Amino acid sequence: MMEGLVIAKYIRLSRDDNDTGSISIPNQHTLLDRYIEEMDVANATILEFVDNGYTGTNFERPAVQEMLELVRSGRVSCIVCKDFSRFGRNILETGYFIEQVFPLYGIRFIAVTDDYDSDNYKGHTGGIDVAFKFLIHEHYSNDLSKKIKSALHYKMSNGELITQNAAYGYFKANSGKWEIDENAALVIRLIFKMAVEGSSTGAIRNYLCAAKHPTPHEYKAMKRMCNLVPKCYWSIEMLLRILRNEQYIGTFVSGRTARKHVASSAVKSVDEADWIKIPDRHPAIINKEDFDKVQRIFAKQRQTNPRTAKMYLLSGKVICGCCGRKMTYGGKLNAATFRCVRTLADPSAKCYKHTVKAVMLDKAVLDIIAKQAEVLLGVDNLTGLRSIDQVQLQIIECETQLQRYITHQQESYEKFVTKEISRTTYQSTKNDYSTQINKINNRLSSLKQASQMNEANEKMVTLADKVVNMQGDEEQREIVDAVVEKVKVFPGYGIEIVWKFVDFETRA
């Protein structure tokens, strides 16, 4: 009779599974509950872990991680799941847990419909039958993913709209096709008209803000919430996305992103040469002649704009101290400025028409960096950081000891399986080794934290040396990137620098 047990029920359903049939969550509940009822476990504690909508190709799942944490702390006696594939589809990772981790912690593992119970194998893992089932599950997952990708690619190649939402300027009709949303289309035509006539993106943005035109995101939100008051804060990036979007000439564009790997939710950008483009797939808002003319204007600007060849000193680091938004860089040479454009449509805002000259800001930041570097180099207790970090030697020693105890623990389990030692002896030695392993892990954690602090301080002192002797624009840019996280600019030329190193902290 099994008494005093803690049984963990594990249930998983991925997004690619149909929530019906034997693998649905309710059916897995019923199956596992009936199986546990037939076990002689009247006094057992039953825990339940459910991952709904997670792939089985990896173990980045919240419920399974919570369950494994209990396994590591010795608070689970038995794990029950429907089959191997519910626990995991990757043969290497799943096999590692079933063959090494669970036996090490004395965990009984049961896969009900695969007729697998680790108690029936006593020291071996099920042989070719189990391995073959693992291979089938993993092959099924990879094959399913390929079929789904192939089906989506086929639909995209035939111009089928697989997205739920239409682009700004369109709406998705009942037929599934895109139709023109005339209210939004008026704004798009205005943007292209101004661009064709020679207006800069900055001038177009300023006009849209002043005319109180909602941004694309706000326009869609207003359709759902009638009482929403738009802020009308257009950005250059919004305009560029519209002015470069071929969908406004009726071209179907798809396949611009792809999943990074099987069943991953993370995506990556795809080269434009690999995009799927089908002309005349939906009504055009802009004629092709105007669209091509705008693209030629962009190409000419890229050739003549010096910023395309060389980034400015504080690129991407200047933040408005009032609204917290990035300030836009614009202008020529010594006349260039950083400007807050988020509040151009709001005269009541503190940062309305807030600007600062780029040359003055660059000089102020470089002066502050130089002064801070001189202060740091004058602190005696930092010079000792240049010596070899002795903490690394202690880390190596601890890691060696840790591996030794882990090996001893594994050897102890092997002796127990082969009946060279009793269960009592095994449990005693296992507890002793676990205690030592925990102590070493705690020591390692402290040493690695100290090592990271020393490395950061060493890097800071090296940078301080370099700052005092910095020369040339390229070296200045390198140093600013290394020590400055962002620069907050307030009306009246007040600035606050957020440093990448705490010791550099100052305020001007």
Image: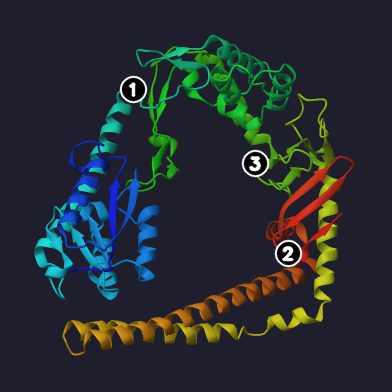
Horizontal arrangement in the rendering, residue 31 relative to residue 11 (left or right)? left
Q: Which residue is farthest right?
A: 492
Quadrant of the image occupied by residue 426: bottom left
Disc 1 designates what residue?
A: 159
Which of disc 2 and disc 1 is earlier in sequence? 1
Q: Nearer the viewer, mark 1 or mark 2?
A: 2
Badge 3 marks a residue whose secondary structure is helix
Disc 2 designates what residue?
A: 502
Amino acid type at circle 1 is Gly
Who is closer to the viewer here, 134 or 353?
Answer: 134
User: Which residue is painted at 61% across and 15% down in the image?
Assistant: 187
Tell me the number on the disc at residue 467.
none
Q: Residues within 10 Å of mark 1 (few under 14, many from 20)?
A: many
Disc 3 designates what residue?
A: 308
Amino acid type at circle 3 is Thr
Quadrant of the image occupied by residue 120: bottom left
Compared with 171, 48 (above or below) is below
User: Which residue is painted at 60% across and 77% down in the image?
Assistant: 451
Instruction: Please give the count of numbered marks on the rendered protein.
Output: 3
